[in-house]
Image: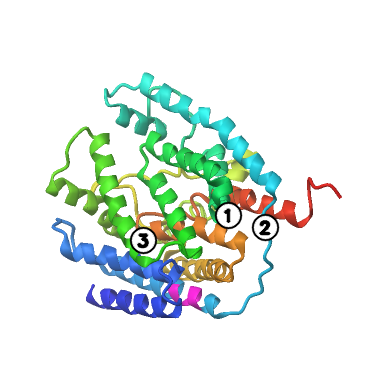
Amino acid sequence: MIGLYILCIALLGLSYISSNRNIFAPAVITSAVWFVCLSLFFLLHHNLPPLSTQFITGLSLWMTLLCLSSLFMQSLSVNSKIRNPSRLMRNIYFYISIATFPLLLYFAYTAIKTGTTGNWALDLRRATLGISSHDSSEAYTPFYFLIWNSAFLIELLYASKRNLGRLIILAFFCIAFGVLTMSKAMMLNFFTMTLTLLVFKKVINSKHVLISIVALLLFFIGLQSIRHSAKLDDDQTEDMFVTYALGSMSSFETLKPKSSYHSGENVFRLYYVLGYKTGLSNVKPIYPILPWVQKPIATNTYTCMYPLFKDYGYWGIGIFAVLLGFFYGFLFKKAEENDPLFILLYTYFVYVILMQFSGDVFFTNLAGHIKMYLLLIIPFLASKHHLFEKK
């Protein structure tokens, strides 16, 4: 553990200096996230057993290879062609957002009306997870929410007095989605995207980011108490941090390497989904909500290394750490060159990088990432090829 902690600190220092002190660089986020988690493991009172060789080896591979490969990509020179998105497509995204907002309100109304717990916040959460008594649609990342996110990011990147009204409306939509689904993850997603984009626009600095993080933690504690209709005391707040920040590290110890029933069923889940839905394969894709374990802590999160380790063992962790490091490093480098499209893309993926301490967001939600990529690139393609413009 001490060696892992020292490695984490060394990677954090190297990444911060090599990334021109940009705290949103992929290597900085990766090493900082694990530095915080390991620090909390030492500082918080908990009954979790010491982390064993399996987790220490896996995390050492993951951190080292992802950080170094992303830093390598950042060191390369890239050419960027600066283009702006189509004004017409921006308008289309905005008006689609306006038209689809009632879908969220209907979801919330139905969830509360048919709820059985007597706690409106808990009823909303149960409906979001699909375990309520009514037949709710999938609340997590429905397509209209991706449109809201895309529209909001583009308007924020080009924020001015002219589009301030629509920016406020889109921000309200995104925040309302997080509140009405009782989802801390969706709130964190909106929060990280906004802060990252403002840092790239040089509107805020690291000090503002740290203050915002403290404010968000207080908000999450309040949201948790509302969901459970209770005022959290110090012990309960500490338990919440143990569950969300440390639980996945301990549960990773329960995994067996290369224990997947089908080859690559976790990493290449999208392939199995497409094959099953098109009738080309009779293999059902794994359920995205993972099974719970009760010991050493009740949780169903296993860090981002879960699909890699479960499918391919330590080799999977190492290989995909390098590949994802190249991918994140390339996005970040292009964003640093002030390429608007890549600023938006990297801003979106910051949340994916940040949540690695909890679980896998990249492979599990790969279909959502592809949809988001298409939504972000369409306005730029329309502008590049002069679509919908009079010649």
Q: Read off the residue under disc 2.
A: 84
Question: Gap between marks 1 and 3, in whole Å?
Answer: 20 Å
Q: Read off the residue under disc 3.
A: 209
- 374 and 91: which is toward the camera: 91
Q: How is the image coloured?
A: rainbow
Percent coordinates x, y for residue 76 in the rendering: 58, 79
Mark 2 or 1 closer to N-term?
2
Asked whether, in this view, residue 300 is left or right of residue 268, the answer is: left
Q: Are marks 2 and 1 in contact (CB under 8 Å)?
A: yes
199 over 190 or under it: above or below: below
Q: Secondary structure at mark 2?
A: loop
109 over 332 or under it: above or below: above
Q: Which mark is residue 158?
A: 1
At 58% across and 51% down in the image, what residue appears?
A: 154
Q: Secondary structure at mark 3?
A: helix
Q: How many marks?
A: 3
Read off the magenta span: 67-71
User: How many other residues sit within 10 Å of disc 1, few (<14), some (14-19) or many (≥20)?
Assistant: some
Q: Are marks 1 and 3 in contact (CB under 8 Å)?
A: no
